[in-house]
Amino acid sequence: MSLPPFDCHTHRLRPNAIHNVRLGVAGPPSKVWYCAGIHPWDSGRYTVQNVQWPINDHQWVALGECGLDRMCPVPYERQQTVFIEQLAISEQFSLPVFIHCVRAFHEVALLRRSDSYTLPWIVHGFNKGGNALQTLLDAGLYVSFGSAILDPATPAAWALPQVPEGSFLLETDESDVSIDAIYATAAVLRRCTVADIHRSIDIARQNTRLSGLASPTA
Ligand SMILES: [Zn+2]
C-alpha cells in the first residue's frame, strides 16, 4: 500500500505525518514522527525547564507547536519568554520549528530577522489576509495550510496561490479531512496538477529540513 501524501502537522495518528505533542499535556507517541513543544496556551503552566524534552529520540523531528497568540489568556510577556526559550532549544538540537501564530505575525517576522536563528520556521495553519503572508515570506519563513483552504472564501484559499513553489507545506491539523483532499484542493487553487503540488512539497521539505527523515517505525 502506498503512503498518503506528506502531512506536516496533525493532532491525530496518521501515516506519513508529523504528530503534534503538547509537552506537559501528552507524551510522545510511538512509531510516528512528531514535533514537541510548549503551546502558548500551556505556557502559563510550563516552561522549558519543567517539561521533559525527548532528546535522543529520532522520531522527534521538529520543535513546536510553539509561538505567540494574542487571543490567549496567558500573559503575552510570559508567552514571549517561553517561545524565545524554545527557539533556543531548536537551535541547540538543530530542529525546524512549527509556529502557532495569532495576531503576532509582525513580531514573529521581526524575531526571525535577528541573527540568532538559523533553523527553518514554519507558521502552521496559516489563514490570514492582509500583508501577513508577505511579512512572513519576506522574513524567510515558511507557511503551512490546512483544511481552511477547502473553503474558497477563506484567507487561506486566497493566500495559497501566492506562495512561491517550495515555500509551503500542507497539513490536516485537528481536522478529520484527508490529506489527499487538501492536496487536491491545493492543486485546484494553484491551477496545477497534484503531481506539481507533490514536487513543490518535496522542495519545501528539503528547505525546511523535513526530508529524508528516518523511518518512524524503525
Ligand atoms: Zn496544531
Image (tube, grey):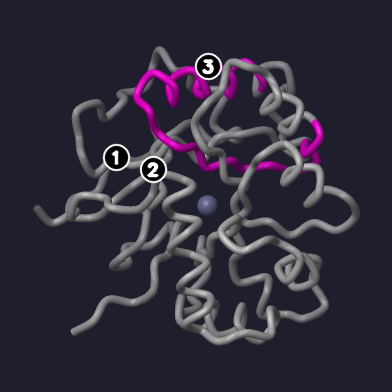
Side of 142 where 52 appears, left or right: left
Q: In terms of depth relative to the viewer, which is nearer, 84 or 30?
A: 84
Seen in the picture, residue 58 relative to 213 is either above or below; the reply is: above
The reply to whether the magenta stretch includes residue 58 is no
Q: Residue tagged by mark 2? A: 35
Q: Position of residue 215 (x, y in %)?
A: 17, 55
Q: Residue tagged by mark 1? A: 60
Amino acid type indicated by mark 1: Trp
Residue drawn at x 40%, y 40% is 62
Q: In terms of depth relative to the viewer, which is nearer, 191 or 174?
A: 191
Mark 2, secondary structure of its residue: strand
What crowding class fits label 2: few (fewer than 14 Cα within 10 Å), some (14-19), or many (20 or more)?
A: many
Q: In terms of depth relative to the viewer, which is nearer, 66 or 145?
A: 145
Tag 2 and tag 1, C-beta contact below 8 Å:
yes
Q: Where are the magenta residues, as a range?
A: 80-106
Q: Earlier in the sequence, mark 2 or mark 1?
A: 2
| Numbered label attached to residue 85 | 3
Q: Earlier in the sequence, mark 3 or mark 2?
A: 2
Q: What is the spatial separation of the Cα atoms under label 3 and label 2, in whole angstroms?
A: 16 Å
Q: What is the spatial separation of the Cα atoms under label 2 and label 1, in whole angstroms?
A: 6 Å
